[in-house]
Every structure is written in structure tokens, then in C-alpha cells.
Image (spheres, helix red, strand yellow):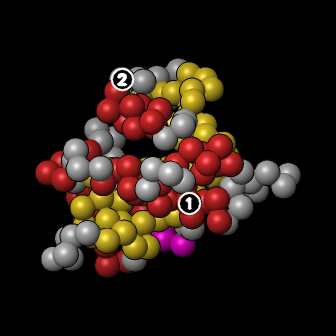
């Protein structure tokens, strides 16, 4: 399995994973518009099948750029193998290289599996966003300081 930047040929596979993973999936056009994002990666099996993806970008913020993990999903039959963690770490490393000082993301309050992964990677909750999702569920805004994250994970890879 390899992790590489996403390209246009991956978008249909990404969309299938998105639809299998989320009750309110992103449309094709959303992924297409982010193909140039600095941290849009896919995990690909040896046979070329896309197993998962992560989408992250950077927003300028007065010299302390903020990274944003916008989406992360792994194909249901490939979950539990550490693939989500590998994709997340790849994206965080790339966001650090392009200048992000911190990275934020939103996660469903009830998604304990995702919250556990993010907690393990140093993300901390900063606030609750009421009714963030279309079904009315709250989101938690999580943030990690990349300086701290890099120090914490440099010995675990």
C-alpha cells in the first residue's frame, strides 16, 4: 500500500468511499475543486484500488497559517488497519511543510472511532458547534499544534 497525491482519475473511487462512509456525502464537484489542495492524498493498494483518502488545505492567518483537515475516510473493508492514521499523519506532515502552525478539523460528537484517532494524534477539543451537520448532530472543533505534534510522533513512526 502506498500513499500518494490524489489525481482526477481517483475521484470516482473517492466518491464511492465518501458515500459509503458518510450520511451527508460531499458531491463530486467538491473533491474536484480541491485537487490542488496541498494535502489531498489517497492510499492505494498494490492492485491500484483506492482504499482511503484525506483532504487538507491551509488558510493564511497573519503569519500563523491554519491547516484544515476537511475530509478523511477509509473504505469500509479496509478499516482497522491503521490506514486512517497513516493518511492523517501524511496530511499533517504536508501541512507543516507548507507552513501551517496548527491544524483544525470538525468531527461528529458521536463518532468515537474518529475522536479516538484524533485524540491519539494530539488533537484537543476547543469548542462544540451546535447542529453543524444536516441531521442536527453537533460537531467538535479539534485543534493540534504541529510543533508539539511533530515532537510527539517523531519517535512513533
Task: Report the residue at 26% width, 69% height from top.
Answer: 1
Q: Is residue 118 above or below residue 56?
A: above
Q: 67 and 147: which one is in front?
A: 147
Mark 2 or mark 1, earlier in chain: 1
Q: Residue at x 47, y 32 (%)?
A: 119
Reading the image, the residue beneath label 2 is: 110
For the magenta stretch, what is the residue range? 32-36
Task: Left or right? Give the position of 78 relative to 53.
Answer: left
**Residue 41 location (% of width, % of height):** 42, 66
Q: Residue furthest front?
A: 155
Q: Residue at x 19, y 53 (%)?
A: 78
Q: Looking at the image, is 40 positioned above or below residue 114?
A: below
Q: Main secondary structure of the magenta part?
A: loop
Q: Look at the image and say whether residue 7 sits in the magenta stretch.
A: no
Of the pair 97 and 104, the residue shown nearer to us: 97
The image shows residue 35 at horizontal and vertical percentages of 48, 71
Indicate the quadrant where residue 58 lies: bottom right
Q: Which residue is mark 1?
A: 93
> Tag 1, which secondary structure?
helix
Residue 17 shows in the view: yes
Is 137 on the left or on the right of 97, as rendered? left
What percent of the width, then of the height, locates residue 134? Answer: 40, 31
Amino acid at each position: 500500500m502506498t500513499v500518494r497525491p490524489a489525481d482526477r482519475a481517483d475521484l470516482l473511487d473517492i466518491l464511492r468511499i465518501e458515500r459509503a462512509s458518510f450520511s451527508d456525502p460531499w458531491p463530486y464537484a467538491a473533491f474536484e475543486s480541491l485537487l490542488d489542495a496541498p494535502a489531498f492524498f489517497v492510499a492505494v493498494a498494490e492492485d491500484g484500488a483506492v482504499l482511503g483518502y484525506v483532504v487538507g488545505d491551509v488558510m493564511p492567518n497573519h503569519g500563523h497559517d491554519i491547516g484544515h483537515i476537511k475530509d478523511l475516510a477509509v473504505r469500509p473493508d479496509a478499516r482497522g488497519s491503521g490506514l486512517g492514521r497513516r493518511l492523517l499523519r501524511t496530511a499533517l506532515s504536508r501541512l507543516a511543510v507548507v507552513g501551517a502552525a496548527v491544524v483544525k478539523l470538525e468531527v461528529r460528537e458521536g463518532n468515537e472511532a474518529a475522536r479516538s484517532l484524533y485524540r491519539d494524534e494530539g488533537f484537543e477539543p476547543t469548542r462544540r458547534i451546535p447542529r453543524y451537520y444536516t441531521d442536527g448532530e453537533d460537531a467538535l472543533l479539534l485543534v493540534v499544534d504541529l510543533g508539539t505534534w511533530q515532537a510527539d510522533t517523531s519517535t512513533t513512526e
